[in-house]
Image (tube, rainbow, N blue to C red):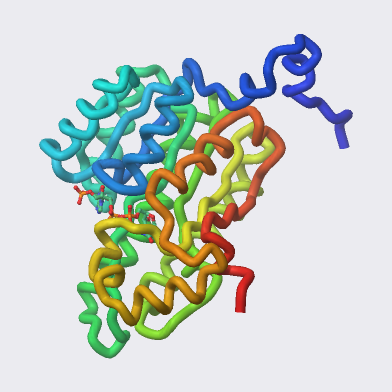
Amino acid sequence: MNQPQNPNTQNTQNTQSYLQQFSLAGKIALVTGAARDIGLEIARALAGSGAHVILNGRNADTLASAVQNLMAQGLSASALAFDVTDKAAVKAAFAQIAAQHGGLDILVNNAGVRNRKPLLEFSDDEIHTMLETNLIAGYTLSREAARLMVPNKSGRLITVTSIAGQIARSGDAVYTGAKAGLTGMMRALAAEYGPLGITSNAIAPGGVATQANAASIADPKINAHFATRTPLGRWAQPAEIAGAAVFLASNAASYVNGHVLYVDGGMSIAM
Ligand SMILES: NC(=O)c1ccc[n+]([C@@H]2O[C@H](COP(=O)([O-])OP(=O)(O)OC[C@H]3O[C@@H](n4cnc5c(N)ncnc54)[C@H](OP(=O)(O)O)[C@@H]3O)[C@@H](O)[C@H]2O)c1
């Protein structure tokens, strides 16, 4: 094993504030599914920490207004509309990123879709769509990002999984399988790219008050169930997930690789 080299040491010896370790100044980040909710707040937090953030989603108009919203806060952001399940569009998007920015430092695989119902009610096409968006896109996006990161021997792959990748409940088999698969992918990429200076980690949110959960929040029974299952007793706001992304993208996480960071109010450890 080589002698330990701590890239943080120099900065701390220079008596810079430890907060400097969290700076993403000069970094280029792509956040998929960033038009709203968790993805948008992750994009806001990365940009707020100094990165230029490329927001992805399928709807160019919604993305443009999200970018305007960030720029009005003085943040550096741009939009790249494409469907993460469209293989040709993914290749074209990464070619555009390489041409415009010369590379990519941070990928946040966040885009996801939710379709909660018993397996018997799923058509083959519905299963396929869920797996294409929630699992297979994680592979294609990570591969294209790695192509840009490997030559620099540096990069951060951050995958938004879910508490559902670890624990299961009835009526959610397709989503649960996809998120568990993403967790395995994230770990395998940590092993594959660690030697090349690229880390791979996951953020696993618990219940977050987003559009995807609007019906559950409005249902008093489901809402009460979530409150009692979560030690913090409430849903997270989307912005409460974003700090984990800044940490994993930053130099403060230089030795964190292959980790699932639960941001779930304690749900995963409570009975
Ligand atoms: N909400 C929660 O409680 C929770 C808990 C655990 C994990 N998560 C995970 O966190 C991530 C974000 O969840 P969220 O609740 O913020 O979701 P959301 O509100 O439904 O937003 C999903 C985002 O993904 C985009 N998107 C969907 N399909 C896409 C595709 N094929 N290509 C490109 N973009 C696509 C959507 O934009 P367009 O529709 O405009 O394309 C939107 O910006 C997901 O991976 C989800 O599984 C959420």
Position above or below: 135 against 109: below
Quadrant where ligand 1 appears: bottom left
Number of numbered tags placed on the structure image: 0
Residue 68: % across, % down: 20, 26
| Residue beneath the point at 22% across and 73% down | 126
Residue at the image point whose x is 39% and y is 77% from the top: 224
Q: Report whether residue 180 is seen.
A: no
In the image, what residue occupies the spot 61% across and 79% down?
271
Query: In the current view of this chain or complex, which residue is farthest to the top?
Result: 14
Residue 49 visible at all: yes
Q: Which residue is rendered at x = 36% and y = 40% of the image?
A: 41
Q: Residue 56's spot in the image, x, y percent?
A: 27, 39
In the figure, 147 relative to 102: above or below?
A: below
Q: Nearer the viewer, residue 136 or 74?
A: 74
Residue 208 picture quarter: bottom left
Q: Residue 233's spot in the image, x, y percent?
A: 49, 66
Q: Is residue 8 above or below residue 83?
A: above
Q: Is residue 174 left or right of residue 105?
A: left
Q: Nearer the viewer, residue 70 or 35?
A: 70
Q: Is residue 222 left or right of residue 27?
A: left
Q: Is residue 186 left or right of residue 6?
A: left
Of 15 and 115, which appears nearest the observer?
15
- Give whichever of 190, 61 is nearer the camera: 61
Query: Going by the picture, which residue comes out furthest to the bottom?
Result: 120
Quadrant of the image for the N terminus?
top right
Q: Position of residue 199 (x, y in %)?
A: 60, 39
